[in-house]
Amino acid sequence: MEQLLPFRNVGASGLKMSTLGIGTWLNFSKSEDHRPIIQAAIERGLCHFDTADMYGALPGWSETLLGDTLSGISRSSYVLSTKVHARVGKWPNDAGLSRKHVMESCSKSLSRLKTDYVDIYYCHRYDPDTPLEETMDALATLKNQGKILYVGISMWPAEAIRQFARLAQEARVQIVANQVQYNVLQRPETEVLDICRETGIGLVAYSPLAQGLLSGKYRGQAQKHSRGMISYRNKWMKKITDDPTKMTALERYFDVCDSAGLDYISVAIGWLLAQDNVASALCGFSSKEQFEQTIRGIGDQLPTGLIEEVNALPDWATLNTQPDENEGKGAVYAVDSP
Ligand SMILES: NC(=O)c1ccc[n+]([C@@H]2O[C@H](COP(=O)([O-])OP(=O)(O)OC[C@H]3O[C@@H](n4cnc5c(N)ncnc54)[C@H](OP(=O)(O)O)[C@@H]3O)[C@@H](O)[C@H]2O)c1
């Protein structure tokens, strides 16, 4: 019998999730395409699915597809998360973390996901225009209404996390997860990691394969339907691929894996799951085969020497040759266009 995915508690909470999760950001376009992936994943014990109010060709699209795909599967068997903050309409209150938008967006998400509650409701980015007290009060209302069980944050500045965690304690709301970009060449700030550890917030690591770059598939002739080859999907990846210093660091990663005789995906996932406080690696899959390939290395411990070699690789952020104009503006990974 095939081994099931291990699971971990999320931060200091009692909530458990599989060490691999499936996200729907740029991957979810037709529910019938995704049913075989989700079915295969569930059979292997994967029980962590993530979306956001703004993922998909139009806001809400991915939530609708995920809701359709998960329908018929026992709701208690999986952890479902969605997010609020990004702009989903043209009116002033169609974005951010105001009480108005949080309450309205949550209701719409639940109806699209065809469920009464989400397990983790993420504040997708920090909103400097809304008092943290107002957002926390809205989240406490949603919790008391049974519409959300736990709260998450994503890519917040360290000091805002500290303040929000204090408010959560007063409001008896549990912030369980910080969804952070985390992979061998893109790591969260140490201060953020420290605050999360101190406040019992676990890490959900998104883009564990750096959107596919760490698989090595772009070294040769990548298939034309790959994310990197589609102009409306590769704009985040291009910030890396257009920068030769970052690509050199990527090649160094491949050299480290080659010297150890291990495949690039297993090292990327194994390294991530060996990091402190990481509950789950949140992946995207375009096919069942990708899921099956990625899951192969799970559970194998990487040699300590190899982990140290990967640790010694530079973080792409430290190699910034051109400043990112969105840096520090709380930009959210935007809507995918058809
Ligand atoms: N909170 C946030 O701000 C935020 C931001 C970004 C993402 N996320 C979440 O994290 C999830 C995952 O992000 P991501 O899609 O960037 O993750 P990722 O796992 O790093 O990249 C996914 C891509 O990697 C490629 N891939 C996966 N397995 C492969 C394999 N075995 N062999 C070769 N290529 C493989 C596929 O590319 P192709 O499609 O090209 O085949 C796939 O689309 C999102 O869906 C979303 O839920 C959150």
Image: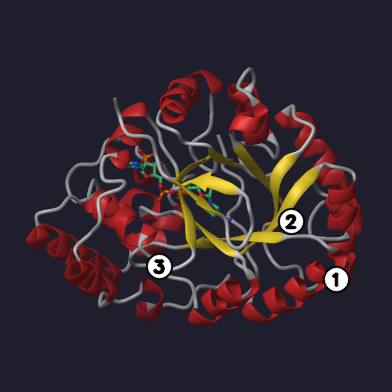
Q: Horizontally, is 168 left or right of 66 in the view?
A: right
Q: Are marks 3 and 2 in contact (CB under 8 Å)?
A: no
- SS state under label 1: helix
> Hey, what amino acid is under mark 1?
Glu
- Badge 3: few (under 14), some or many (20 or more) residues near its Cα, within 10 Å? some
Q: Determine the residue positioned at 25% across, 78% down.
A: 312
In contact (CB < 8 Å): disc 1 and disc 2: no
| Percent x, y of residue 317 | 41, 75
Ligand 1 under 8 Å from disc 2 Cβ: no
> What mark, if any, has residue 170 been given in the picture?
1
Q: Give the total number of marks visible in the rendering.
A: 3
Q: Residues within 10 Å of mark 2 (few under 14, many from 20)?
A: many
For disc 3, the marked residue is: 186
Q: Is residue 93 visible?
A: no
Which quarter of the figure is the C terminus placed in?
top right
Looking at this view, is 194 or 200 the one in front?
200
Residue 132 found in image quarter:
bottom right
- Mark sitting earlier along the chain (3/2): 2
Task: Tell me the distance, in whole angstroms, between the alpha carbons under discs 3 and 2.
Answer: 23 Å
Q: Residue at x 29, y 74 (%)?
A: 311
Q: Identify the image quadrant of residue 314.
A: bottom left
- In whole angstroms, how far apart are the C-alphas of marks 1 and 2? 23 Å
Label 1: how many Cα within 10 Å (few below 14, some 14–19, many 20+): few
**Alpha carbon distance from label 3 to label 1:** 33 Å
Q: Position of residue 168 (x, y in %)?
A: 79, 67
- Could you tell me which secondary element the residue under label 3 belongs to? loop
Q: Earlier in the sequence, mark 1 or mark 2?
A: 2
Q: Which residue is mark 2?
A: 85
Q: Earlier in the sequence, mark 3 or mark 1?
A: 1
Is residue 314 or residue 275 the one in the foreground? 275
In front: label 1 or label 2: 1
